Image (cartoon, helix red, strand yellow):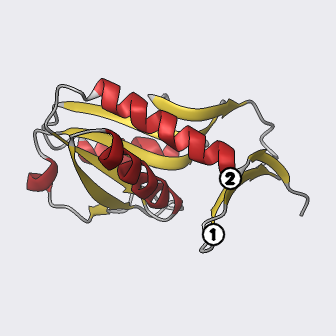
């Protein structure tokens, strides 16, 4: 498989920091926010954003993992925090790639059952070919790609991160 790098490790680190500052700016009036990352890469990205937020802001930041079956998103969704733990707080839903919008829209629907002060979405890569009318409030980069191309984000155990188009 031929890898066309679209975000290097350094670019991802800068992007995460920028997104964290944008989140802080948006939620500056809040005391506490929840960063909810969609299982696997979305959660890894949410962890990285949370780490930066804790160093740049006085906000109390809680991390939540959102477990969703990406092949069958209609199945029940579970979270590592209870509904009471994120109720009436600001919440940012995080995923690595916004592709068709299917995963994100089902995850958004899950959180709509609970009153939230503010609800935003964040992605590292926003593809411009969506099936559902969902948008990312905070995004690293936007790409117009063909439907045959795949965007992959790699967070490896050595700490090297990159995104590529295949």
Q: CA distance from mark 1 to mark 2?
A: 11 Å
In the image, is residue 40 above or below residue 131?
below
Q: Residue furthest bottom?
A: 157
The quarter of the picture where residue 129 lies is top right
Task: Report helix, strand or loop for mark 1.
Answer: loop
Residue 88 numbered tag: none
Q: Give the camera-side residue of 89 and 131.
A: 89
Direction from residue 146 to residue 71 in the image, left or right = left
Q: Residue at x 47, y 61 (%)?
A: 44
Q: Give the camera-side residue of 108 and 35.
A: 35
Percent coordinates x, y for residue 138 in the rendering: 47, 31
Q: Is residue 92 visible?
A: yes
The quarter of the picture where residue 76 lies is bottom left
Percent coordinates x, y for residue 30 in the rendering: 16, 32
Task: Report helix, strand or loop for mark 2.
Answer: helix
Percent coordinates x, y for residue 113 in the rendering: 18, 43
Name the N-terminal-most of marks 1 and 2. Answer: 2
Q: Crowding near pointer 1: few (<14 within 10 Å), some, many (20+)?
A: few
In the image, is residue 129 above or below residue 154?
above
Residue 156 numbered tag: 1
Residue 9 numbered tag: 2
Direction from residue 2 to residue 92 in the image, left or right = left
Q: Is residue 124 visible?
A: no
Q: Give the camera-side residue of 142 and 59.
A: 59
Total residue callouts: 2
Q: Select label 1 or label 2 by which is in front.
A: 2
Q: Residue at x 89, y 64 (%)?
A: 1
Percent coordinates x, y for residue 135 in the rendering: 48, 29
- Is mark 1 in CB contact (under 8 Å) with mark 2? no
Q: Residue at x 86, y 56 (%)?
A: 3
């Amino acid at each position: 498989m031929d890898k066309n790098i679209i975000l290097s490790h350094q670019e991802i680190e800068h992007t995460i920091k920028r997104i964290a500052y944008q989140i802080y700016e948006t939620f500056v009036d809040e005391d506490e926010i929840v960063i909810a990352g969609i299982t696997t890469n979305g959660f890894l990205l949410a962890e990285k954003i949370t780490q930066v937020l804790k160093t740049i802001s006085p906000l109390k930041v809680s991390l939540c993992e959102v477990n969703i079956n990406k092949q069958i998103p209609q199945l029940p969704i579970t979270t590592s925090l209870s509904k009471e733990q994120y109720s009436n707080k600001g919440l940012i839903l995080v995923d690595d790639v916004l592709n068709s919008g299917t995963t994100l829209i089902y995850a958004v629907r899950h959180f709509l059952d609970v009153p939230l002060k503010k609800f935003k979405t964040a992605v590292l890569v926003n593809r411009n070919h969506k099936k559902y009318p969902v948008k990312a409030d905070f995004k690293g980069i936007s790409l117009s790609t063909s439907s045959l191309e795949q965007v992959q984000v790699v967070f490896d155990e050595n700490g090297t991160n990159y995104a590529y188009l295949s």
